[in-house]
Amino acid sequence: MNEIFFHERVKKFYIWIKRMSRSHQLQISPDALWHHLAVTWENVNGSYEIFVDGKFRERGEDLAKGTLIIPEGNVVLGNDKDSHVPAGFEARDAFVGNISRVNVWDYVLPRETIELLSQRCGLENGNTVGWRDFKNGSFNGEAFIREPSSCQRVE
């Protein structure tokens, strides 16, 4: 089971915590520019917020209220782990595009911090999982490490 999972499909953005989900009419523009996405969630009352390029876009409540995320698990980027598939992943679900500077904190970042991070070129590291952890991890499929500046066009 996926502990935390985000995906965008058919102009909807989905947030999953364990087996509970919420969706919003939200699409990140496919305009060949880097976009900063931030999602916050706190487990006491299940509140969450979605930010794109540092700007608040959506919020919700009661998402997996009281749920704890299991520590020491695997972090998967670009696909979700399916229990009905022997290998665990389906090619049709794979992310196609560029991902950089993924970080996870064990507390909700203030809105002001999220806005500041969206304006930087990606030197931060989360206190739970940092971009350096992904760079040093194992890869499957066609995954390549690139170190583009989040302030430049995607080439």
Image (spheres, rainbow, N blue to C red):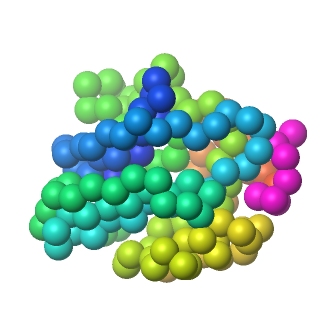
Query: In this figure, what is the number of numbered marks?
Result: 0
Quarter of the figure with the N terminus: top left
Question: Residue placed at 34% from the left, 46% from the top?
Answer: 15
Whole-percent x and y of residue 121? 77, 68
Reply above or below: 113 against 22.
below
Percent across and percent down for residue 25 are: 41, 36
Find residue 128 and report its image quarter: bottom left
Q: Specify the principal SS of the magenta part.
A: loop
At x 81%, y 59%, the residue is: 151
Q: Is residue 134 magenta?
A: no
Which image quarter holds the C terminus? top right
Left or right of 55 on screen, residue 39: left
Q: Position of residue 116 (x, y in %)?
A: 64, 75
**Residue located at (25% from left, 64% from top):** 47
Q: Is residue 133 visible?
A: no
Quarter of the view holding residue 135: bottom right
Task: Name the residue located 60 percent from the left edge and 45 percent from the top edge.
Answer: 139
Q: Is residue 3 above or below residue 80?
A: below
Taking the image as shown, residue 68 lies to the left or right of residue 154, namely: left
User: Can you give x and y, in whole percent of width and height, for residue 88 in the image?
Assistant: 36, 32
Can you name the residue that lies furthest to the top here?
Answer: 92
**In front: 124, or 75?**
124
Q: Is residue 107 in view?
A: yes
Comparing 153 with 144, the one in front is 153
The residue nearer to you, when weighing 45 against 55, is: 55
Segment tinted magenta in the rendering: 149-155
